Amino acid sequence: MNYKESSLILKEIKKADKILINCHRGPDSDSVGSALALSGVLKNLGKEVAVICPSDLPSDLMFLKGANEVIRVNFTSFDFSEYDLFVILDSSTYSMVTGLKDSDKPGINSVVIDHHISNEKFGNINLIDAKTTSTGELLYKVFEDWKIDFDKFVAESLLTGIIGDTGTFQYQNVGKETLRIAADLIEKGADKDKIVYNLYRNIEFREVKMWGKFIESMMIEDRFVWSAVPLSVYKDFGEYTYAKEDVANLFSPIVKGTEFGIIMIETSENILSVSFRSRTGFDVSKVANEVGGGGHKAAAGARIEGLPFQEAVNKVLTVARKYVQKN
Ligand SMILES: [Mn+2]
C-alpha cells in the first residue's frame, strides 16, 4: 500500500454516482493529464464523470483522449448540486481550482489529491505527497493501491503529467522510481514520442519569435539572469498564454555561472506574471514567497498586481538581489 488514504478515497468514489474532476486555472500538462486519467478510470468503474476547468485548455494538450470533453465553467455560478463528489487534482488552494480570488467551498463532498508542499488541505479527504514529481505519478500510485488495470489512454495521460512536471525527466526530483513508473506506462501503451512531439515540437512560429524577445532583453547579474517583457510586446506577439512558462523552462536555468533565472511578463495593465527557475540548488521559492507567490524549490512563480511595469520589475529584482547577498 502506497497511501493509507487510497482506500478511503475509493470508498467515497464507490458511494458516488456522479463525480466532478477539476483542471486548475491556467492548466498545465499535469493538471489536464491527471484529470483525464482519473476520468478514464472512473468511467471504467461505471461512474458518470464531468471534468471542469475555469480556463480554456492549452491547444498542445488537445491530443489527449477526452480533452475535448472538458467543460469550461464559471465557478461564481456553477451548480454543484447535481454531483455527489468533487475530486480536486494538482491544486494547492481552492482559488487555483476556481480561478477566483474568493469563493465559497463547494457544497458537496470533496477529495484533494496533490503533490504541492504548500497544499492547504481544503478537502474532506486530502492526499498530499510532495515527494512525487507530479499528480500524474501520485495517481499512478493510487491506482496501484486500488489494484486496477487501465488502458493506454489513461497511461498516456499520466505520462503526459509526469513529462510536463519533470521537464522531460530533467529535474532533480526524478529518480529511479519515477523512471520505473514511466517505463511501466510506456509498456501499457503510452506513446512517449507523441507526447514529446505535442508538448515541445509543435510551437507556433510567432511564439518562437517571441522567445527571441526574451533572450534579446535578458540581463545577467551576480548569480542570476532575468528578462522582462512589457504588455505592448506581449500583445504584438499574440499574447500566448503559456509563453512565459515555456521561456522560463527553456532559458532561465541554463546560463553558465548563474544559479537561477527570472522571467517576467506584463500580461495585462499593471499585472506582472513572474517565473523563477533554479539551475543549481538555489531555493527560488523563497524569493517567490517574499513577492507574494509560491511554488517549489526549483520552480516557482508570482503575480505582482497594481504596480506599473518598471516598478513591479524592480520590486522582484530587489528581493532577488537581497537573497543572492544572503545565501
Ligand atoms: Mn503538478
Image (tube, grey):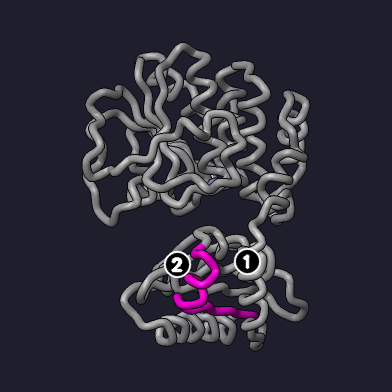
Q: Which quadrant: the N terminus?
A: top right
Q: Whole-percent x and y of residue 122?
A: 33, 42
Q: Is residue 211 left or right of residue 39?
A: right
Of 140 and 211, nearer the camera is 211
Q: Whole-percent x and y of residue 176?
A: 77, 41
| Residue 227 magenta | yes
Residue at (37% x, 45% y) in the render = 54
Q: Secondary structure at mark 2?
A: strand
Q: Is residue 281 left or right of residue 270?
A: right
Depicted 11 relative to depicted 138: above or below: above
Residue at (63% x, 48% y) in the render = 164
Q: Is mark 2 within 8 Å of ligand 1?
A: no
Residue at (44% x, 41% y) in the render = 23
Q: Secondary structure at mark 1?
A: helix
**Mark linked to residue 247:** 1
Q: CA distance from mark 2 to mark 1?
A: 15 Å
| Residue 276 magenta | no
Question: Within 10 Å of the Cα at label 2, are there few (<14), some (14-19), or many (20+) other Cα atoms?
Answer: many
Q: Identify residue type, mark 2.
A: Ala
Depicted 252 relative to depicted 190: above or below: below
Question: Within 10 Å of the Cα at label 1, are there few (<14), some (14-19), or many (20+) other Cα atoms?
Answer: many
